[in-house]
Image: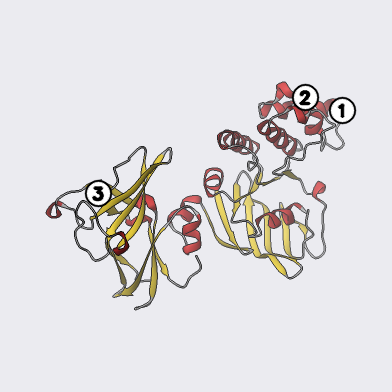
Amino acid sequence: MEVLKLEHVSHDFGQLRAVDDVTLAVSRGELVCLLGPSGCGKTTALRVAAGLERLQQGRVLIDGEPVGDQKHDVPPEDRSVGLVFQDYALFPHLDVKGNVGFGLRGWSKKNREARARAMLGQVGMAAMADAHPHMLSGGQQQRVALARALAPNPKVMLLDEPFSGLDVTLRHTIRDETLNVLKSAGAATLMVTHDPEEAMFMADRVALMRDGRIVQVGPPADLYAKPVDKFVASFFGDINRLPGSVTGGQVQTPFGRLDAAHLAEGQAVEVLIRPEALHVQPCAAPEDRAPGQRPARVRAARLLGRSSMLHLDLPANGTEVTAPAADAQDGIQLHARIPGRYLPAENDLLDVQLDRSQTFVFPADHVT
């Protein structure tokens, strides 16, 4: 069931259109991430949903009832939304349980404190109920902010870059805990982030924005494996780019011909190859190579922690690579990402094969 729905929402700041005809729905128990680069309009869309920005065009509905349109402008405190911001916005003069219970209007003092302590237990902060915000770490403040937002049992949770102020190690831990708490609460959750990895980890669906518009929305795996354009494909990580043109419904690459039947004959294209789509193995004799394998020279190899990045040179003219040196300016430079530790020496020769499921062909004149 759709709990939060934005219908054809647009919002301007002077001459700047920050949100442009955005339609998006979030169901109960679902977490949707608004993802995109800085300035794309994702936070403005969230603030319109919350009622923090007055609706200019379109409609905002919660549980099918309009809370924002040309006739309605329900204030944030009456929309049954919980808000978590990147600065957490805790009240310094209140202790932790006072912060969590702050939004429980109409509750008795006893019930308010009991609810606050219960929510703090849910986020692992029961022992800090009597502490003040300045005594807490960033991760602890984030937990308190989440408990405060969930305490009134809102229908909708809205999170704006909630993990951006945390260091990398803590961020991974806190977002895992936050996801579990949100799923247990069952609220419809809309979260803003600029981090593709975070969106893929947290979201049931991702709505990727650019210049105020939603470019593609769907499960994270669909945006990664079935991007609608070059912008979507490249937003989720490094991309190797090769120029080409369509001939007979295909485009020629160093690894063979790729399907381009959806594009016009003779059209200039760009082939996008994810680094993890390049599989390598020790160089074999030419007669022993599998179809589509190409020899390449290692220019550099770097360990990135969970994976290794290889900078490779392929000869552009289809000639055989031979040791000890080749003119890099005459070749094609590609990056390959290999799981784990794999660090061949500079100038080593490797055979490279392409995983076509992680390779995409788009018109060259499309936005990147």
Residue 120 sits above or below residue 105 on the image: above
- Name which residue lies at 77% across and 65% down: 56
Q: Nearer the viewer, residue 304 or 146?
A: 304
Given the image, on which type of amino acid does mark 2 rest? Ala
Given the image, on which type of amino acid does mark 3 rest? Leu
Image spot of residue 307 (x, y percent): 40, 41
Given the image, on which type of amino acid does mark 1 rest? Lys
Residue 131 numbered tag = 2
Image spot of residue 242 (x, y percent): 36, 64
Query: Would you name the residue on which mark 3 appears?
Result: 350
> Mark 1, mark 3: which one is toward the viewer?
3
Query: Would you name the residue on which mark 1 appears?
Result: 109
At label 2, counting other C-alpha atoms closer than 10 Å, the crowd grade (few under 14, some 14-19, many 20 or more) is some
> Mark 2, mark 3: which one is toward the viewer?
3
Side of 237 where 49 appears, left or right: right
Say if residue 1 shows up in the picture. Answer: no
Q: Nearer the viewer, residue 225 or 289?
A: 289
Q: Which image quarter: residue 39? A: bottom right
Q: Which image quarter: residue 304? A: top left
Say if residue 267 shows up in the picture. Answer: yes
Tell me whether circle 1 and circle 2 mark residues in contact (CB < 8 Å).
no
Number of labelled discs? 3
Image spot of residue 76 (x, y percent): 80, 49
- Name which residue lies at 85% across and 25% down: 110
